[in-house]
Image: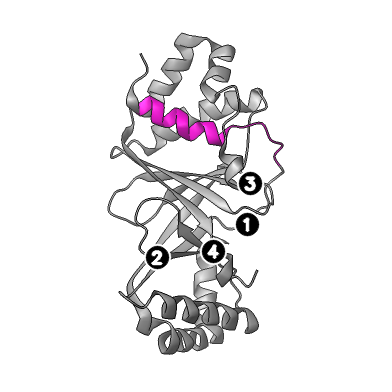
């Protein structure tokens, strides 16, 4: 019998292993900076207009970082906008904070957007460069599955997942997905499986599930063992869907 935890892992892996060619990854930084901004009650429209104008100001003034904007498509639908910049090193943070652009951008933000912000949150995450398959594309829908691990179990979980990924690669099953470790937050270690698609239809799973492919390669018993080896390190799983908010990107 397949336990609930294993079912959740299989559902997450189903999106990470669909039939799709994968391009080589460029060597870049692995750190991402994320923000979440929630408008004050009754000020959603003013907040959105101010954020659009501020994002345009950043583009017009040659922001050295590239930002993407997202909205939740599941869970808490309170108007929060998620803002993310990826592929950084720690040295990038020093350069960004010491440059003239930061002070000008902060002044524009404080004058025009901050008055409409009710809550703000910021965090860092680190891409696992050996667990990423991310060809360039116009991705508009993202699913984030968070594996909140037991203390001290990060390396063991990663090793177990890598074994499954290895078998899927042998079968030619990969897709746009990335594993990234949270570096801040209340529960560490936490690793996120991020799967991206061009549209909602891309989230449909193939006729043959990831587990069926795994069982064909190693047998039912070994497939169950491989899944159990991963799930024994997991304390709980959570997840959300996000859609790209192009109105803030000038697209």
Q: Does dot 1 land on a helix, a strand or a loop?
A: loop
Give the number of the disc on residue 80. 2
Dot 3 or dot 4: first in sequence order is 3
Instruction: Give the mark toward the camera: 3 or 4.
Output: 4
Distance from Cα at disc 2 to Cα at disc 1: 29 Å
Give the residue at x 55% y 77%.
55
Give the residue at x 48% y 16%.
223
First to last magenta residue range: 5-22
Please state which of residues 145 and 248 is positioned toward the viewer in this rendering.
248
Residue 159's x, y, as percent? 46, 31
Dot 2 or dot 1: first in sequence order is 1
Dot 2 or dot 3: first in sequence order is 2
Quadrant assignment for the C terminus: bottom right
The residue beneath circle 3 is 134
Distance from Cα at disc 3 to Cα at disc 1: 13 Å
Dot 3 or dot 1: first in sequence order is 1
Dot 1 or dot 4: first in sequence order is 1
Give the number of the disc on residue 202. none
Instruction: Give the mark toward the camera: 3 or 1.
Output: 3
Near mark 4 (Cα within 10 A), the count class, few <14, some 14-19 or many ≥20, is some
The residue beneath circle 1 is 28
Residue 94's x, y, as percent? 50, 74
The residue beneath circle 4 is 245
């Amino acid at each position: 019998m397949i336990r609930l935890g294993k079912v959740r892992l299989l559902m997450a892996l189903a999106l990470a292993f669909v039939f799709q060619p994968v391009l080589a990854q460029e060597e870049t930084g692995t750190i991402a900076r994320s923000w979440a901004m929630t408008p004050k009650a009754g000020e959603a429209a003013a907040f959105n207009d101010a954020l659009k104008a501020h994002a345009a100001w950043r583009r017009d003034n040659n922001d050295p970082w590239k930002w993407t904007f997202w909205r939740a498509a599941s869970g808490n639908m309170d108007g929060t906008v998620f803002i993310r910049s990826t592929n950084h090193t720690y040295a990038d943070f020093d350069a960004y904070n010491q440059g003239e652009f930061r002070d000008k951008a902060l002044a524009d933000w404080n004058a025009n957007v901050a008055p409409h912000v009710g809550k703000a949150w910021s965090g860092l995450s680190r891409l696992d460069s050996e667990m990423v398959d991310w060809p360039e594309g116009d991705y508009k829908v993202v699913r984030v599955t968070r594996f909140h691990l037991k203390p001290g179990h990060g390396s063991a979980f990663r090793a177990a997942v890598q074994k499954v990924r290895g078998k899927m690669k042998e079968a030619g099953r990969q897709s746009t997905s990335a594993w990234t470790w949270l570096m801040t937050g209340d529960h560490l270690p936490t690793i996120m499986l991020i799967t991206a698609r061009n549209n909602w239809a891309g989230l449909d799973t193939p006729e043959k599930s990831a587990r069926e492919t795994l069982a064909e390669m190693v047998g039912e018993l070994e497939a169950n063992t491989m899944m159990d080896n991963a799930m024994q390190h997991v304390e709980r799983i959570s997840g959300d869907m996000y859609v790209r908010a192009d109105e803030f990107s000038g697209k």
